[in-house]
Image: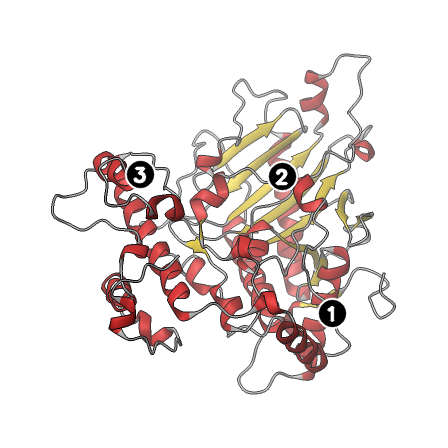
């Protein structure tokens, strides 16, 4: 652990993360610094809610205990959430016999799937409380990275949700190792399996909150050690940690938390372990882009340059070992002070030749590629067509031929005859701007791009 780091998991009052107009207060800068150091060292932090919210969190856990106690000892129908395509459509009761976990998922905008029984109580209020806290933490991360205010608003759900909208974020009421559940699945001479070093998980969220009634959540710190993070929590305290979506959106500057749940301490328990888990998720039909990081002057590695569709990201398998074995995994640097850390960060960026800003023409191509994919995907979803977009580099050499990948996509999707269907590499820069303005009015005004490009130079140029 760094000499100037935190000796234990950082504790931050939620009220100190409330932004105010004008210059940031000393309490805000201290709270952001403590939060960022804790996330850097331990991949987690403890958020202290106002004392008035402790009763709501406690009643949520009591309601969870009552809900699972009144359920059958072994449900006749087991629902699982393994289908990644349903990531934003889950609601109601689910169970995973392999991990001895049951959950009830509350997602605003979806009707409860179980009409024959009452769901846990207080879910809308708890969802609102943890959702607001998650956004404050996310904004604090943006402040630390010197991003503009509310940098992730475009990929978050509306507040409140509009008519017929379904929340991408979800509140899970969880029960681990309920005796009547796992005894049905174990032989008399078997025991609950110990967790191993391979039983680790990562959330695909931006920010996750967990409040449990018993300790058992272990998170891997910067040194690879497992830290019990929910021990000795006060009634108004909850654990917060970043997920894979934030890792992607910040170009790897914020490492995702790797965690596991200890079930061994539950053996002999008469009721199991209960928790409330909130995941702030990016909304479907948007893209995880590092444009905010580039706009703030941060260097972005090649693997993060191309925006990733949220739906593709959620369905894509992510290897935990790949993250563990990355020696260059970027994360928060532990600062001496907020101002000093910013100066050091800028100095490091200027000295690294790999972190030069993208040229305007390439930034245009990436933006146009993102918008084109989103519009085509919308049509494909309506028609029930599963698309696999071609690689622009592979397509550049044959985009005018009948056997090009784009030609197959046009045929599958039923693209109207005579309407151009092109990769952005087919368009000169001026046409790219027109394309973006057509589908996203005001795009050029919101993107500070110095484009002094002559049409003569662009007439025969294909951006690669």
Q: Which of 162 and 22 is in front in this view?
A: 22
Q: Residue at x 72, y 34 (%)?
A: 199
Q: Residue 319 has which mark?
A: 2
Number of numbered callouts drawn: 3
Q: How far apart are marks 1 and 2 (CA)?
A: 30 Å
Position of 338 compared to 90: left or right? Answer: right
Q: Is residue 232 left or right of residue 295?
A: right
In the rendered image, is residue 13 in sight?
Answer: yes
Q: Please identify the quarter of the rendering in which residue 218 is found.
A: top right
For residue 34, the mark is: 1
The answer to whether residue 22 is above or below residue 64 is below
Dot 1 lies on which element?
helix
Q: Where is 435 relative to 315, above or below?
A: below
Q: Quadrant of residue 452?
A: bottom left
Earlier in the chain: of badge 1 and badge 2, it is 1
Instruction: Name the N-terminal-most of marks 3 and 2.
Output: 2
Q: Quadrant of the N terminus?
A: bottom right
């Amino acid at each position: 652990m760094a000499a100037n780091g935190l000796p234990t998991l950082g504790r931050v009052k939620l009220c100190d993360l409330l932004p105010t107009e004008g210059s940031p207060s000393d309490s805000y800068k201290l709270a952001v610094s403590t939060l960022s150091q804790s996330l850097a060292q331990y991949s987690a932090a403890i958020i202290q809610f106002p004392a008035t919210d402790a009763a709501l969190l406690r009643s949520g856990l009591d309601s969870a205990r009552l809900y699972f106690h009144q359920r059958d000892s072994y449900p006749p129908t087991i629902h699982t959430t393994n289908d990644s395509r349903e990531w934003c459509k889950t609601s109601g009761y689910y169970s995973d016999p392999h991990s001895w976990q049951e959950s009830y998922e509350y997602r605003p905008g979806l009707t409860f799937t179980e009409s024959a029984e009452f769901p846990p109580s207080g879910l809308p209020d708890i969802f609102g409380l943890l959702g607001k806290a998650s956004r404050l933490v996310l904004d604090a991360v943006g402040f630390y990275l010197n991003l503009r205010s509310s940098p992730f608003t475009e990929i978050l759900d509306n507040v409140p949700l509009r008519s017929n909208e379904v929340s991408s974020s979800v509140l899970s009421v969880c029960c681990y190792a309920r005796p009547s559940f796992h005894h049905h699945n174990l032989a008399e001479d078997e025991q609950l399996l110990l967790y191993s070093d391979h039983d680790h998980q990562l959330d695909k969220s931006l920010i996750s909150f967990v409040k449990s009634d018993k300790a058992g959540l272990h998170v891997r710190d910067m040194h690879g050690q497992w830290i019990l993070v929910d021990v000795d929590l006060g009634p108004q305290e909850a654990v917060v940690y970043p997920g894979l979506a934030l890792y992607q959106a910040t170009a790897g500057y914020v490492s995702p938390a790797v965690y596991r749940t200890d079930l061994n301490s539950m053996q002999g328990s008469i009721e199991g372990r209960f928790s409330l888990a909130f995941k702030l998720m990016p909304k479907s039909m948007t893209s995880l882009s590092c444009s905010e990081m580039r706009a703030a002057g941060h260097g972005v590695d090649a693997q993060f340059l191309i925006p990733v569709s949220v739906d593709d990201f959620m369905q894509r398998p992510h290897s935990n070992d790949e993250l563990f074995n990355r020696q260059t995994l970027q994360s928060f640097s532990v600062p001496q002070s907020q101002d000093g850390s910013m100066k050091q960060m800028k100095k490091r960026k200027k000295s690294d030749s790999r972190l030069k800003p993208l040229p305007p023409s390439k930034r245009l191509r990436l933006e146009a590629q993102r918008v084109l994919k989103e519009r085509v995907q919308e049509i494909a979803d309506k028609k029930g067509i599963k698309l696999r977009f071609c690689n622009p580099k592979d397509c550049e050499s044959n985009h005018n031929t009948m056997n090009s990948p784009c030609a197959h996509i046009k045929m599958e999707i039923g693209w109207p005859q005579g309407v151009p269907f092109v990769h952005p590499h087919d368009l000169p820069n001026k046409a790219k701007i027109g394309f973006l303005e057509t589908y996203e009015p005001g795009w050029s005004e919101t993107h500070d791009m110095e484009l002094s490009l002559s049409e003569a130079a662009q007439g025969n140029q294909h951006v690669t």
